Every structure is written in C-alpha cells, then in structure tokens.
C-alpha cells in the first residue's frame, strides 16, 4: 500500500521541476531540440528566453514548472543529464588538448616523447615543426596562429 505524498513533498518536487525548467531556458536552441519536450513546454521555454521583466520571467518559470509536472519529466531530465554529461566530456577533452599543447610548447623533448608514446601521431615531423613555430611565437611574443595550429593537430591526434 502506497502512502500518500505529503503536501510538502509535492511542493519540493514542483520547486525542483520549476528550477530544472529555468535551467533549460539557458540552453541554446540546438540543445533544446535534442530534448524530448512536448510542444507546449518547448514554446514556453522559447518565450521565456525573450522575456526581460523579472516578474514576467518568474511567472513564466512557474508556467514551465507546471508544464514540466504534466509532461514525462523523468524522460526529459534523463535527456538533460546526458546532454550535460556529453558537454562535460567535451570540456574535459578540450582541457586535455590544451594541457598537451602547453606541455609540448614548454616541455621540450621529454614532453614530445611522452606524447608520441601515448598517442602515436601519424606525422611526428609535422608535429615537431608545429611545436617549433609555436615556441618561436611565444619567445618573440607574437601571434601568427602557430599555437592554434598545434592545438588543432593535437585534437585530431588525441580524438
């Protein structure tokens, strides 16, 4: 036998869903399209993006919370969590490439040896040239795009 849900618990759940809906307002349209949102909830979120007034935005957030409760919010939240996890993985990958770029520019031959052993890039000679150009740029304090080219090469080698 199920115990009835308390009024306080219902309020906590409603507040949580409203906050999740507000977080979805900050998503880009491309990411919103990836979520399994019902049409009315999608439109409410799009409308909330355009609202500037604090009071109107608060009322729209309440509407979004109400629509979230009526929708299959568990499926929506699962898709939202997977979207965040994917973004987090992309960010971690980006940071790893940045780390290797900085390490190769400042670390000399030891860093290059460690990178080659870890990732086995196809064209080591090209990698050496990119590193040399990036080091020269750094020493001359100019920006010819060598560090960016090195970053792109490293990203293609790591992924």
Image: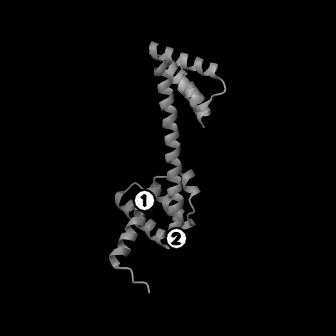
Residue at point 50% right, 21% down? 110
Residue at point 40% right, 61% down? 19
Q: Residues within 10 Å of mark 1 (few under 14, many from 20)?
A: many
Dividing the picture into quarters, in which one does residue 12 lie? Answer: bottom left
Image quarter of the C terminus = top right
Tag 1 and tag 2, C-beta contact below 8 Å: no
Task: Pick whichever, 152 or 58, lies toward us.
Answer: 152
Picture coordinates of residue 78 (x, y %)?
Answer: 52, 61
Q: Earlier in the sequence, mark 1 or mark 2?
A: 1
Whole-angstrom CA distance, mark 1 to mark 2, is 15 Å
Q: Is any part of residue 79 visible from this angle?
A: yes
The kind of secondary structure element at disc 2 is loop
- Residue found at the very far right of the displayed protein: 122
Q: Which residue is mark 1?
A: 22
Q: Residues within 10 Å of mark 2 (few under 14, many from 20)?
A: some
Q: Which residue is mark 2?
A: 71
- Residue found at the very far bottom of the displayed protein: 1
Picture coordinates of residue 1 (x, y %)?
Answer: 44, 87
Where 34 falls versus 93 (above or below)?
Answer: below
The kind of secondary structure element at disc 1 is helix
Picture coordinates of residue 100 (x, y %)?
Answer: 50, 29
Residue at point 45% right, 65% down? 64
């Amino acid at each position: 036998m199920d115990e009835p849900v308390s009024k306080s618990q219902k309020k906590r759940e409603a507040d949580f869903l409203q906050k999740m809906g507000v977080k979805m307002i900050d998503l880009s349209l491309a990411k919103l399209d990836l979520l399994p949102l019902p049409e009315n909830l999608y439109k409410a979120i799009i409308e909330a993006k355009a609202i500037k007034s604090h009071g109107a935005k608060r009322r729209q957030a309440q509407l979004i919370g109400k629509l979230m409760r009526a929708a299959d919010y568990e499926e929506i939240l699962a898709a939202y969590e997977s979207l965040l996890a994917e973004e987090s993985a992309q960010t971690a990958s980006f940071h790893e490439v940045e780390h290797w770029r900085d390490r190769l520019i400042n670390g000399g031959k030891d860093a290059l040896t460690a990178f080659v052993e870890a990732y086995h890039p196809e064209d080591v000679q090209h990698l050496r040239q990119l590193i040399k150009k990036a080091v020269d740029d750094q020493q001359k304090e100019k920006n010819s795009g060598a560090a960016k080219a090195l970053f792109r090469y490293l990203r293609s080698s790591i992924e």
